[in-house]
Amino acid sequence: GPPHGIQVERDKLNKYGRPLLGCTIKPKLGLSAKNYGRAVYECLRGGLDFTKDDENVNSQPFMRWRDRFLFCAEAIYKAQAETGEIKGHYLNATAGTCEEMIKRAVFARELGVPIVMHDYLTGGFTANTSLAHYCRDNGLLLHIHRA
């Protein structure tokens, strides 16, 4: 994502000469973090390059953000080990404050996930700019969702 563009995403995923294949996990609400991670794994193991959270997937009582991040990272690494390909998942880091959003991005980076997502209309310009600076300074790609 900006400021990097598609080429850096291709480089991170090691995918060239064809479209990147991905999907948004559905149902977007109602799954436990473990079942959500299982859906991510099945999609990635089935041949997709990446999966992503929908904008409504945030930190609900049935699926807290930290648990979701952990199960999604586990799914990515398991699919990578089994396919020999680099895989990704766009983790939604959108939160009620900039501090919480950055905390989520830091955790994603610690897990080794290459990309995070932000709901631009929910978070606003300042939050988006803060997250963009963090991602740029720390080697994360940033996907902007305009829900």
Image (tube, rainbow, N blue to C red):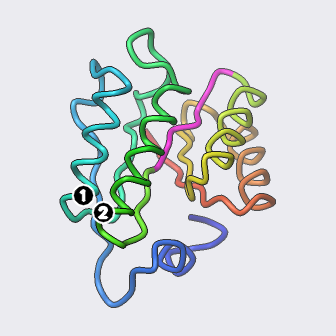
Pointer 1: what residue? 45
How many marks can you see?
Answer: 2
Name which residue lies at 23% across and 36% down.
26
Q: Is residue 129 above or below residue 100?
A: below
The numbered disc on residue 131 is none
Q: Is residue 106 above or below residue 35?
A: below
Pick out the residue farthest to the front.
Answer: 81
The quadrant the C terminus occupies is top left
Magenta segment range? 90-96
* Residue 20 or residue 76, whichever sits in front: 76
Mark 1 and mark 2 residues within 8 Å of each other at the beta carbon:
yes
* Residue 109 or residue 24, whichever sits in front: 109
* 123 with respect to 26 (left or right): right
Q: Amino acid at mark 1?
A: Arg
x and y percentages locating residue 40 in the rendered image: 31, 45
x and y percentages locating residue 56 in the rendered image: 40, 27
Residue 91 falls within the magenta-colored stretch: yes
| Element class at badge 1 | helix
Which label lies toward us, 1 or 2? 2
Mark 1 vs 2, N-terminal side:
1
Name which residue lies at 48% across and 45% down.
73
Pointer 2: what residue? 82
Name which residue lies at 18% across and 59% down.
46
Q: CA distance from mark 1 to mark 2?
A: 7 Å
Q: Is residue 126 above or below residue 134?
A: above
Q: Could you classify mark 2 by the number of other residues whose Cα lies within 10 Å: few (under 14), some (14-19), or many (20 or more)?
A: few
The quadrant the N terminus occupies is bottom right
* 123 with respect to 34 (left or right): right
x and y percentages locating residue 63 in the rendered image: 41, 19
Pick out the residue farthest to the bottom.
Answer: 17
x and y percentages locating residue 80 in the rendered image: 38, 63
